[in-house]
Image (spheres, rainbow, N blue to C red):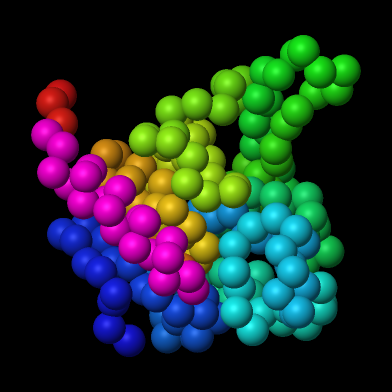
Amino acid sequence: MMPYYETENGKLYHGDCLDIMREMDDKSIDLVLTDPPYGIKISGKIGKGKDLGRVNWDNEIPSRKVFNMMFRISLHQILWGGNYFIEYLHKTRGYLIWDKMNYERSYAECELAWTNIDKNSKVWRQRPQNMDGGKVHPTQKPYNIIAKCISWSETTGLICDPFLGSGTTAVACKRLNRRWIGIEISKEYCDIAIERIKREVAQPRFA
């Protein structure tokens, strides 16, 4: 399959992640780093997340296929919102906990990422900021959080984000000199991601 957009260190595919991951070889990816959507019904009602096309996340079988495919293409995963998909994931697990430091509320506001890299949990405390030009996606993660995931994983190889959204993983890979593959079913978000990546490529970085 031809990429929708390509740079020196990465490729963006516009399409269904199941179709595109099927074309990848076993264990050809060093790290799957992504934020799978949840709360999306086959009727198209969106609770949280991104347009998944024909993947029905309220039906166990298609959901399990997506996660099984992620485990086929890579030994290592960091999956944001993994607590919502725990029945599809391996029992041996740890969590990366993003504490948003919103202490004005009566409860802790956190997001969890499931990972099989380390069984120990880790807490990162950071307010939701550094969105690189503003928040353009409903579940967009700050650059610093995604960059921390990459650095914490210690991978220097190929990173895949099957739900690329607005392209934060690609931007982080560019800054950290990692190769990447992104997949996004929404053309609108593909185009948003491309603009962010182009700005990043054009931006000089100094040691």
Q: Quadrant of the C terminus?
A: top left
On the question of residue 95 being in view, the answer is: no
* Direction right: furthest residue: 106
Of 48 and 33, the residue lying toward us: 48
Chief SS of the magenta region? helix
Q: Quadrant of residue 192?
A: bottom left
Q: Quadrant of the N terminus?
A: bottom left
On the question of residue 67 being in view, the answer is: yes
Q: Which stretch did the figure color magenta?
A: 185-204
Q: Quadrant of residue 204?
A: top left
- Within the magenta stretch, is there residue 196? yes
For image coordinates 34% across by 63% down, the residue present is 191
- Within the magenta stretch, is there residue 192? yes
- Indicate the position of residue 176 as horizontal and vertical percent values: 29, 39
For image coordinates 43% across by 61% down, the residue present is 189
For image coordinates 76% across by 79% down, the residue present is 43
Image side of residue 168 versus residue 57, left or right: left
How many numbered marks appear? Answer: 0
Image side of residue 162 versus residue 8, left or right: right
Please determine whether, in this image, residue 47 is positioned above or below residue 133: below
Image side of residue 52 versus residue 168, left or right: right
Please determine whether, in this image, residue 67 is positioned above or below residue 86: below
- Indicate the position of residue 65 as horizontal and vertical percent values: 67, 80
For image coordinates 38% across by 65% down, the residue present is 190
- Indicate the position of residue 168 as horizontal and vertical percent values: 41, 47
- Indicate the position of residue 101 as horizontal and vertical percent values: 67, 18
Image side of residue 71 versus residue 21, left or right: right
